[in-house]
Structures are given as structure tokens and as C-alpha cells.
Image (cartoon, helix red, strand yellow):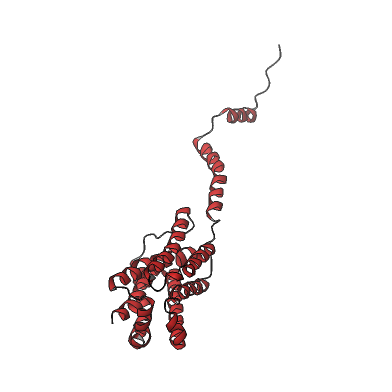
Amino acid sequence: MMPNAPFDPLENSADRQSNQPASPETLDSSENASEQPDAAMRAQYRGVSDPLFGFIIAAALSVGLMPLLPDNVELRYTLAWGALAGVSVLSWLLGNMERIGQERPDNLGWGVLYPVMLGIPFLVFLSQQVLAPAADRLFPGMTAGSLLAFLVFVMPIAETLFFRGLLQDQLAFWLVGLLATLWNILLFFPVMWGAVTGFPAVTVAIVILLLMMNLLYVYVRKRNGLAASWICQIVANLIILYIPFLQ
């Protein structure tokens, strides 16, 4: 009869560990490891879209709708800004754009204060010479109610979501300001082409004003967040465009 083998505690403990059922923590870690490739694939898929391609589409649509001028300015504006908003909403649904979270009141306050500081000097010194004629030519034939809807809802939503929400996460903030100004030129100048060619000094002043406004929006977005930038554009539109339009 063969004697029993000597007791080996290491071997027995290894056998017990191999025969012991996996703990919930082990199962969770293995499941998380198996889910990591899927999460990586989803993140890679969501990052494929190119916002510059959306900008090109919206700009081409704005130029292509020029035959609607001058009788259907509102329709052209609506379709052009709608294209920007559509690209932005699609990117938001796919997860490529920053969400607006709970904002601090001081950030929203800066979103009001900055456009007031920018707009009041222009309103005081250039209202009659530049702002009022420009507003009349940019929005010809619009009623005060229609213009208010464009300046408070349509324009800020589309441009804030696209330029500051989607594009600014991928490009330098000054480049986003330049692209937004280029968009405004392509959108607005065909409407007021007679004034653009007849009054070059006023045209230069309008371009500088648009550039300052767009650089302000991207700065507020970088400093105070997306919601503050949205409010900033609404307040600037009311001061620089809507009030001179009513005069």
C-alpha cells in the first residue's frame, strides 16, 4: 500500500482557487473588458463627422439660394441657418458636441455684460450712420416681429450650436471667429449688394463689426461656456441690429 503524499498547502490552495467560482467583481471586470472594444468603436464612429464639410454645405446652400433674392430674403435666411442647425443637431445626436449643462449665474451674467460693453458704443456713435441703414438693408421688408424671431431664435441657435458648440472644439477660437465672419459675409452681403459696392467705407465698417462680434462670441464660449455665448449673441443682436432697425 502506497503512503499518502505529503501535504502541500500551496498546491491545495491553488486547487481551491482554481475550483472556486468567480466572484461578482471578477465577472464585472471581465464584462467591462469585453465591452471596451465596443465603446472604442462607438467613440471612433462618433468622431468621424467633419464639421467643415457641414460648413461647406451650408455656405454652398446660401450661395445657391441667391436667385430667391430680393423677394424671398426670409426664406433664404431660414434655409441657410436651418442647414447649420441641422448639421449641429445631427452632431449632437451622435455625441460629437458639448452639451449645455447646469450653468452658474455669473457665467450667464458675463454673457449679458460683454455684448452690452461692445454694443453700446456702436449704438451711440454709429447708429444713424451705419447700424440703422445696415439693418434696413440686411432685413428688407421684414416686420419688427419677424426680425425679432430671427435675431433671438433662428440666428443665435444655428450659429451658436454650429460655430461655438461644434466647430470650436476642433479649431482655434480665432479661426472659428474668422469662419463665422465669412459665413455672415456670404449670407448677408448678397442681400445688400448695392450698398456693398456703392459705399465701401460702410462695408468695411460692417465687416469689422461682424468680426468683433464673432470673436466676442468665441471668447465668451471659451471663458464662460456655451450657454453664455448663446445669450451673448442674442443680446448683441438686439443692441446692434434690432434697436437701430426700430429707429
* Front residue of this view, candidates 58 and 158: 58
Q: Would residue 227 be visible to someone looking at this image?
A: no
Q: Residue placed at 37% from the left, 66% from the top?
A: 154
Q: Is residue 196 left or right of residue 2?
A: left
Q: Would residue 28 be visible to someone looking at this image?
A: yes
- Rendered location of residue 61, percent (x, y): 48, 66
Q: Is residue 11 left or right of residue 39?
A: right
Q: Residue placed at 54% from the left, 30% from the top?
A: 21
Q: Residue placed at 42% from the left, 69% from the top?
A: 68
* Front residue of this view, candidates 232 and 101: 232
- Residue 121 lies, with reference to residue 10, above or below; the image says below
Q: How many marks?
A: 0
Instruction: Please tell me in which quadrant of the rendered image residue 33 appears.
Output: top right
- Rendered location of residue 105, percent (x, y): 33, 67
Q: Quadrant of the N terminus?
A: top right
Instruction: Please tell me in which quadrant of the rendered image residue 148 appears.
Output: bottom left
- Rendered location of residue 5, percent (x, y): 68, 21
Q: Quadrant of the C terminus?
A: bottom left
